[in-house]
Image (cartoon, coloured by chain):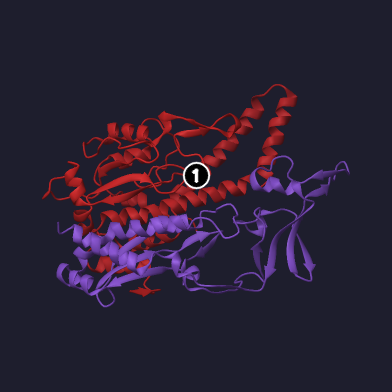
Chain colours: A red, B purple
Amino acid sequence: MILGDSSTVAQALQKLQAEGKLPQGLSCEQLAKLSRAIQKYSGEVSDRIIKKILADWKDKIQAAQSLTDPAAQRGVIYDLTQFVGNEEIANSIRFALKISQEVASGAGQYLNQNLSPEVLDEYPALEFKRLFDRTVPRGLKRGPKGALIMVPEDNWPSRWAAAGAEAGDEDWLEWEGDAQEGRGVALKSSGIWQALGNGAGGYDDTLGNPFPPFAFNSGFMTFGVHRDEAVNLGLIGADEVAKPAKINFAKLFSEVAS
Amino acid sequence: MNEVSIRIASDTATPELQRWIGELGVARFHGRVNDDLVQVTMVHLKQLGGNVRGYPSTGFYEKFARGVLCIPTENGVAVVIPPQIIQGRVVGLGMRVFGGTITPQTVKMLAIPISPVSYGHVPGEFPNLFLLKTVKGDYLCQRGEEVSDKTGRIRQVGKSGLKGNVGRRINSNLVFLFKLVSSVTQDGNRDVLPSDEKLLQTAIDAVGRGLN
């Protein structure tokens, strides 16, 4: 076992391509974008988040303009100038970059889970469960005196059920266990992953990708489910060939913000 | 030393694993151990959690945990932990694992956060910082109060509009946020990565499970 091996992700990807482990037709340019996306962040996601931040400002300005009471108007404008002038904008941008980077890391793992036929064969399914703790987990909200209040319609089991309904296949199972410690299991090829990222059920905090993080500040991740377990769960036959996710390379390798 | 990879190869693994790699071939061996090795490394990084001073977590290790990959090599597999962008800089785990000396690249001095308020931040994020030179070193500080240009009265910085940790500045008239140093030497910590034994056992279990 050697620590500190000097091979980079880019070299590893080039090697995978040379060995035919990546899909045919993946150009050098796409490969370069993949490497940059993994090591930096997705420009599309970053751009989208920053636009959302700007839209929020626009809404606040419009709200101030629509007020008729001068005192109330001044109050809103004062809040706005404080917002613009202090570090919240820096925090917003930093938050956008943080999310973008998490998405880029997720993209790397997504490809790692799907591109190799051998990995697919051994781990045909994924389980979706919590890895990272959150102060206010999704499905809960802060109430009076800081108490946490349940919001069942916002938790992951609810989202999982809504995404399953839109998945267009039966390659997923009902949520197991409770909202925070339980899990959802589906084949890698199921449409439930993209539906989850698309906010199926009307959720507007999702990021649009078929891999974690599916939504802002999510602590849930996906982990491979071994073939034996997937067979026992009835998701796949013992000798059935596992299918990869339908990867949208054009979307995944959007231009990277420099 | 931005990227850290742990290689489990036929020339370095246990005899049992060497035999499996030889029998299965690298591609199948990779397929069998890929997700389990990624998961065990992610969980390990996640468990590292907070910092020695008890400051609010910045999610440092979570960033790396999200990026863990397992890739095939010539004669085995490598668990790769790619570098991440932190405060606009490319940061790898190598420095944490192997240790070393950090020197400033684009500025004259390194600004080391010495307060829960500044931990996870850079000086540029704090307005009106000033340099305070003492016998114990140079510090970047911030006044907890300032004189209003309009009224001439003393007002507390951050009383309105500033939320979260920054709001704590009003509790003190002078806040020491950063210490300036010319370099920092960090000890290596192998425990940042899962142990060799843990990774090998995970690989052996994954290979064995596929044979049931």
* A8 and B118: which is toward the camera: B118
The residue under the point 24% across, 61% down is B205
Q: Residues within 10 Å of mark 1 (few under 14, many from 20)?
A: many
Residue reaching furthest left? A239
Where disc 1 sits, the SS reads helix
* Residue B37, image quadrant: bottom left
The residue under the point 45% across, 70% down is B190
Identify the image quadrant of the N terminus of chain A.
bottom left
The residue under the point 46% across, 51% down is A100
Q: Chain of mark 1?
A: A
Taking the image as shown, residue A30 lies to the left or right of residue B48, namely left
Taking the image as shown, residue A82 lies to the left or right of residue B89, namely right
Residue A200: tell me if it is visible: no
Position in image of residue A246 (x %, y %): 26, 47
Residue reaching furthest top? A68
Q: Which residue is mark 1?
A: A49
Does residue A168 sit above or below B18 in this rendering? above
Does residue A4 sit above or below A147 in this rendering? below
Q: Amino acid at mark 1?
A: Ile
Residue B181: tell me if it is visible: yes
Q: How many marks can you see?
A: 1
* A139 and A39: which is toward the camera: A139
Does residue B82 sit above or below A248 in this rendering? below
Position in image of residue B12 (x %, y %): 29, 76
* A147 and A20: which is toward the camera: A147
